[in-house]
Amino acid sequence: MARYSGPVCRLCRREGAKLFLKGERCYTKKCSVDRRSYAPGQHGQGRKKVSEYGKQLRTKQFARRFYGVLEGQFRHYFEMAAKMPGVTGENLLRLLESRLDNVIYRLGFANSRAEARQFVLHGHFTVNGRKVNIPSFLTKVGQVIAVKESSRQNDKIKSVIEANSSRPVPKWLDLNRDTLEAKIVAVPNREEIDIPIEETLIVELYSK
């Protein structure tokens, strides 16, 4: 599957906010958004009036890049969310939050969603005791995510988990740091999802 392989800091600058695509670097003064808060390119510093459609598009692009999914995947999640009971925009964010790569990142088992995706692809995690190597796997309430037994001595995995040992974990995840296991205890509320967007703009964009 095709995936963006260019400079990721450029994406953050284009959206005008941190997407936390480079892990630890995003929390330091080296972050490109802090150093150059304008959009990339020759006309990045120019003022430009944004239309309503432009706002909707930028919101959708921000959410898509925040979670690291492709356009086709994102559209599929929206269609799933529209068929679910409740508010479509919030359903969409819940689906994105329930992706296995995002859950791994939220638990502090990876420095970024991109790194979490790589760890999952390499088969370092299990869901209910079975190895899952699909980053887009949608987790459900009651499932237990754990670092695979044979991966717990992996130097990279160990260093990342130690470095993120103090990172707060969302309330909808119950993490046991001693056993490196976590249970999904609830569906995340909108207040618990820290993506700074108006998801209604995405719904308006796709509803045209």
Image (cartoon, grey):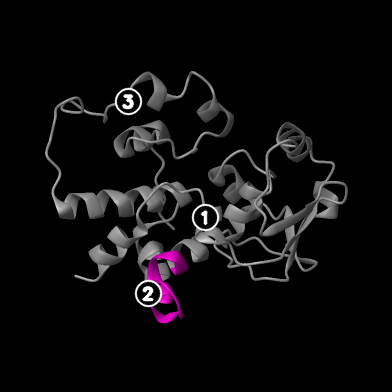
Q: Nearer the viewer, residue 191 or 114?
A: 191
Q: Describe residue 125's horizontal placement relative to residue 31 as left or right.
A: right
Q: Residues within 10 Å of mark 1 (few under 14, many from 20)?
A: few
Q: Is residue 87 magenta?
A: yes
Q: Residues within 10 Å of mark 3 (few under 14, many from 20)?
A: some
- Kind of residue at badge 1: Glu
Count the marks.
3
Q: Describe residue 58's horizontal placement relative to residue 20 as left or right.
A: left
Q: Are marks 3 and 2 in contact (CB under 8 Å)?
A: no
Q: Nearer the viewer, residue 126 or 108?
A: 108
Q: Residue at x 45, y 79 (%)?
A: 84
**Mark 3 / mark 2, whichever is N-terminal:** 3
Q: Would you say the magenta stretch is mainly helix, strand or loop?
A: helix
Q: Does residue 139 show up?
A: yes
Q: Label 3's element?
A: loop
- Kind of residue at badge 2: Glu
Q: Label 1's element?
A: helix
**Residue corresponding to mark 2:** 79
Quarter of the image where the N terminus is located: bottom left
Q: Residue at x 33, y 21 (%)?
A: 36
Q: Residue at x 66, y 59 (%)?
A: 172
**Residue corresponding to mark 1:** 191
Q: Which residues are magenta?
A: 79-91
Q: Label 2's element?
A: helix
- Kind of residue at badge 3: Ser
The label on residue 37 is 3
Q: Describe residue 31's horizontal placement relative to residue 208 as left or right.
A: right
Corner quadrant of residue 112: top right
Could you give the CA–CA distance between mark 1 and mark 3, rounded to whole angstroms? 27 Å
With respect to residue 138, does 82 lie above or below? below
